[in-house]
Amino acid sequence: MATSTAKLRESTARAVPVRPPRRAHSHRFRQRGAIAPIVALFMTIVVAALGALDVGNAFFARRSLQRTADLAALAAAQTMDDACTQPLATARANAAANGFDPDATGQTLALVCGRWDTQANAAPSYFAAGTVDAPLNAVQVTVQRKVPYFFLGPARQMSATATAKSTNLGAFTVGTALAQLQTGLVNSLLNALLGANLSLSVASYESLANARVRMRDVMAAAGVGTIDQLLSMQVDAAQLAELMLSALSSTAIADANLQTDIATLQAIAHGGISNTARFALGSGAGGNGVFALDLADRQSALDATVSPLDALLVAAEIAKAGQPPIQLAAGLTIGGLGAALKVQIIEPPVLAVGEAGMDPATQQWRTQAHTAQVRLYLNVALGTPMLPVIGNIGMNLPLSLEAAPGTAWLQSTQCAPTKTASASTIGVQPGLAKVCLGDAPANLSASQPFSCATPATLIDVPNVVKVTANVALPAVVPQSSAATLSFDGVTPNDDDYQSANANAVGSVLANALSGVAASLAQPSGLDVTLLGGLSLPLGLLDSVLLAALLRALDGLLSGIDLAIDPLLQLLGVQVGVATIHDLSLTCGAAQLVY
């Protein structure tokens, strides 16, 4: 048994080979081969991590720079002025408040004033550096800073640019001054122009003149989505009155007399307006409109405010422009003398809303308003002088006046933290006038040139006597240099109506008529025809006719301007004097555009 066990062990020993002992240096070699890839992988991870830190730091630095540029541009645009003096200081102060020191080593802030205009400038920024004539409405701020790379190389210069715009808007009319209203005159004018039947008080009109609505209110009342759609709308005077009524009823602008003003507009809108002539709300190539608007971004006009009454007066004249004269006051009394007055609208006035400054391409002021161009035909009854042999004869004095438009333009705006400190400057060029002593032409077409060629018929009894006068009245207002007026940003207040008197002519018709009597006394002043064809020298009737004329002219001269000037101003017409009605200065909210 023992022998068998021994043989089994010997057999097992022969079947299992005996391994030689391991060598120590071979083991160490295999360890070094395993560590190298691990180290390489570890170093790769370390380098990637460090690179990620640098990339993250660069990303953070760029984002911080962009934020600094954005905030500085917004702040600078809010203080935009025509000379670009305030924006840079504002941008630097804003950047410093946000942890960016423009004077530190390796850090800079640069600012350029210019104009943002989607029509005139190229995409994508729509910004171009400009001068004060542009006008300026945007700033472009560029900030630079050296950002260190901790692990991947030397410091690099990084920059960020932001463009912000802020559109400041002025709104005004020229030629209207409600302070000079006479009782019932507005009613007479609107009734004649619109075919209405109004009998409102002067106080109602004066209160409505101080009411304001925003362009966005009018747009909402019209149910349109953009300013362009609003301006292209075709309406008649009744529809415009309804739009203004709806806008006033929903506006957020404070009005102490809101209910009174709404009642006045309701009375006008429902006052039986029969003139159905249609016109566009915007003035442009398509013809006359109520609003003249010139903006790089018309949507900027959403918060501009306008007067409903001024808009209605402009619309009333647009509705009658180019038509035959209308009888305005058949029972007018001037200096105790009866008179008949006809008015013809040649060119209606316009209400201006827009930016200050000139368009460098056209060299025209961007925002302009103008007075109306009208003709007045006035026939004054001078009495019934007793002529020898003939007896009492009615004597008239036919006068014609054409007022050429005056213009006003928004020269500059200055927005400040308060409305009182804000200001707009409006330039004014008063209109001219021609006055004729002569019969109105038979064809009173608006397209017919104004003429003083027809002598005045003072007396006309068919086949009995006819007396005519040939007196030339010069233009009463010479061309003069423009004036400028300054308004603060508060409306309504006492400075809303301001006048520029560019000449020393205090009256219009009275000044022109002052030399009529002396001119009539000249040998060629009067021509008397008897019995249908017999001309007689003036000497036979001079004492009677001239005495009657002198008595009549004394009363006429004392009252003619008091009667006519308020009417002219309601029509948006002034001669030698230009009254600006400042409606609003809207300082735009700054917004980033690029």
Image (cartoon, helix red, strand yellow):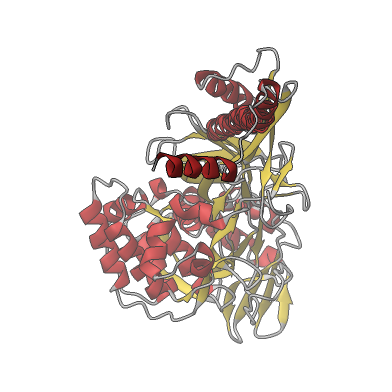
Q: Is residue 83 left or right of residue 315?
A: right
- On the image, which quarter does residue 274 sit in? bottom left
Residue 452 or residue 78, whichever sits in front: 78
> Which quarter of the figure is the N terminus placed in?
top left
Residue 277 visible from this viewpoint? yes
The image shows residue 592, relative to residue 387, as above or below, that is above
| Rendered residue at 70%/26% (across/down) | 26
Q: State left or right for residue 164 relative to residue 8.
A: right
User: Residue 552: x and y, percent?
Assistant: 50, 57
Left or right: where 2 falls relative to 479 = left
Q: Residue at x 27, y 61 (%)?
A: 264
Please provide percent x and percent y for residue 357. Answer: 66, 42
Quarter the C terminus occupies: top right
Closer to the camera, 362 or 187?
A: 362
Q: Nearer the viewer, residue 336 or 298?
A: 298
Could you tell me which residue is drawn at 65 percent across and 30 percent down?
A: 20
Q: In this rendering, is residue 85 above or below 305?
A: above
